[in-house]
Image: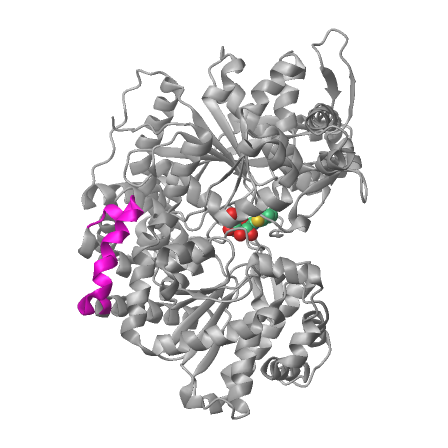
Amino acid sequence: MSENTPPLAVPEHSVESFTRAFLRELNYGRGVDLDRASANDKYYALSRAVRHYLTTRWLETLRNQYRDQAKTVAYLSAEFLLGPQLENALLAADLEDIARESLANLGLDIDELQAVEEEPGLGNGGLGRLAACFIDSLATMNVPTVGYGIRYEYGIFKQTFVDGKQVEKPDHWLHLGSPWELPHPEYSVDVHFGGHTEDKPDGSDGARTWIPSWRVTAKPYNYMVPGYRNGRVNTLRLWSARARHDFDLREFNAGEYTEAVRARTFAENISKVLYPEDSTPQGKELRLQQQYFFVAASLHDFIEHVLPRDYDLKNLPDRIIWQLNDTHPVIAVPELMRILVDDKGWDWADAWAVTQKSFAYTCHTLLPEALEVWPVDLMGKLLPRHLEIIYRINEEFLEEVRAAFPGDELRVRRMSIIAEQPGRAVRMAHLATVAGFKVNGVAELHSELLKDKVLNDFAQMWPEKFTNVTNGVTPRRFIRLANPALSELITAAIGDGWITDLEQLRGLEPLADDAEFRHAFREVKGANKRRLAKVLMDRDGIELAGDGMVDAMVKRLHEYKRQSLKLLHIVSLYEGIKSGRIPLESVTPRTFVFGAKAAPGYVRAKETIELINAVGRTINADASLKGRLKVAFPPNYNVTLAEVLIPAADLSEQISLAGKEASGTGNMKFALNGALTIGTDDGANVEIRKLVGDENFFLFGMTEPEASSLESRGYDPGEYYESDPELKAALNLIASGHFTDGERGGAVASIFASLTERDRFMALADFRSYMDTQKKVEAAYLDHESWSRSAILNVARSGYFSSDRSIQDYLDRIWGAKPIDQNA
Ligand code: TH1
């Protein structure tokens, strides 16, 4: 790229210019005129027109990046849960009003066109959405960044309910194409697999030759990541797997047509579908293929295409930091070693020194079953050279352990990168911890537990390696875009600086005591509830409890998150009303809103969904409740729905067993939109409560130490079942088949047994405390004024949970990269 290229002019910010761009895209880009254009044509032309305004900035950003050779953050993540792109691009380019007016002049409704977009669901839940928030913040904060991931052809499955049971449908989000991606086949990279290794007689120390047996092509697609009105547009590069064209041609010439097609399908399977497992990795070969595929392509891309040709790789750590988003990209560590030692001819020690300065690792979990391990047989078959490299890294590492802790062979075994039991396997979290120069957890409590429990041996050896970066969420998407009414109210009160400096929300604190502001705040909440009611009615025919509290629990379905505890609360309330223990008039009208996908193979999670739907069906149809209680479980919760649901919520349910939810990020989105939290002392809830104040947060349940100690004393859920009559009545009502047309087997029996016999996440132990706290919630909600006051204080004091703050922490504590202002 020439440094002398004159910058393209940004198109004029006017309705006329925008209309010209839109019509040009419609005519030339889509080959239709307005009268004949389909909704998709118009959505496409609109998106492309918006892109014109950002493209100039994108090219400038790339040009400056090449010129400055500044330190770049490479965020490696198997998931980017981006959400709708058009609204974000309109916001970043400051085109919302212009585009709306331009289209209205043409007789078009911009909201209808935006509804055409299928969100790229390239992630499961919090981890993937965090990656999307982070690249937004990195761009807005002017940090040179490239996001690297996989362009899954099918994103997270579409959830439907058939007779209340989850049925998954493929999410072919690309079926109408996407105006947001730009393929660059000329920068395709070959990625190799399989085969064997051989001696390299004239190689450097440690070098071997890898003779792979098959390969695929990784084709990059670039996506713009615009900063918020700051002139920077970073790049997200997602890789798509293609069969090598020579590969099948050879077969084809030999007349083996079907074989050729089979080979092509095999190769292209690699980026076909996102694994729908959340916090429970699947040890499947295809998943390891996906991981190596995108990581190998990304490393090659950076080294061969982004760095100048003569770049001295000894300086690599000054130029790049590879941030590993959980263990999914950790195979990058042996890959960089392989490049340096085998391809570039470096000595092992030199290569390891550079590698150890190049990677940092973020751990997102505490569940032992969620830590990835790969059987050595599988890895040896797929990546024989990488396995050898891992063995050598481990050998040298274990020498270090022995030197630091002489005679402690138990410790050596615990820390080894290779597990011996139940079968020999590579522990990816250990590899990441050994190779990374920093390891961080995602909330204060989580980072402490990492040091004290999961990675305790490592923290003893390298205490300075461990740090915390509490998660955050982008205020652009989750306040400004999702909640325009609240945004206007805030901006009218304190100006719009909060959009990029969320601590400014503190300026709202005094207004919590201003009756007029509280009234306006309630109006906003009311409008958001009406918006939600309309969306749920149009989308799913679901009705809300008129005028009541919106009580929301949205997150992946997992036993540790305890949707079953929420269910017990609902059933207990219902049982109380039906049995006359609770007068109906005393019950605050509420809608319990659920949003949750279960991993397709996670039977108990699916049974929980079935039960929630059964209870919901019974309650919603019971006229004697006079509409005071409703259960709304819209299927297919995703970013699009989150943006409507979260702003409407009064109460946010964050009820995981203490010590199990690493952070949570939904909890932050709710607090920032003025919901109060009922939550355990877990993950980032701890920090939310500290900031918003005890009086504005409903805490319940055991603490982590209490839960651990109960666990080790021997937990028996039967004791709780027998000793709490309300709990027993609720569970018995479920077991009786009351909600399931008399059916007592299936999901009913299974969930009943799992809760009363094992209850791994101790829902029964926290039931009493949860019920009592829910009573406090009801009482508090009746006092509208004091509730609004608390809700406003939640908003005012949650600025800390901006992902901009998280990124600043990463910059200060880990990355050492510097912002570069595009306009300077
Ligand atoms: C989630 C954590 O469960 C959640 O607490 C946290 O807020 C979020 O990450 C962002 O840090 C995780 N998602 C996954 C997904 C997979 C494996 C592990 C985790 S942890 C596939």
| 556 inside magenta stretch | no
The image position of residue 750, as x and y in percent, is 71, 72
Residue 483 drawn at (x, y percent): 32, 58
- Image quadrant of residue 267? top right
**350, 533: nearer the viewer:** 350
- Quick one: quadrant of the N terminus? top left
Above or below residue 321? Residue 635 is: below
Q: Quadrant of the C terminus?
A: top left
Q: How many marks?
A: 0
Q: Does the segment drawn in magenta span residue 503?
A: yes
Q: Is residue 744 visible?
A: yes
Magenta-colored span? 495-518
Magenta-colored segment: predominant secondary structure: helix
Using the image, determine if residue 704 lies above or below residue 441: below
**406 or 415: nearer the viewer:** 406
Q: Is residue 510 left or right of residue 757?
A: left
Write the residue at 51% across / 82% down: 573
Q: Where residue 130 sits: x, y (%)?
A: 47, 46
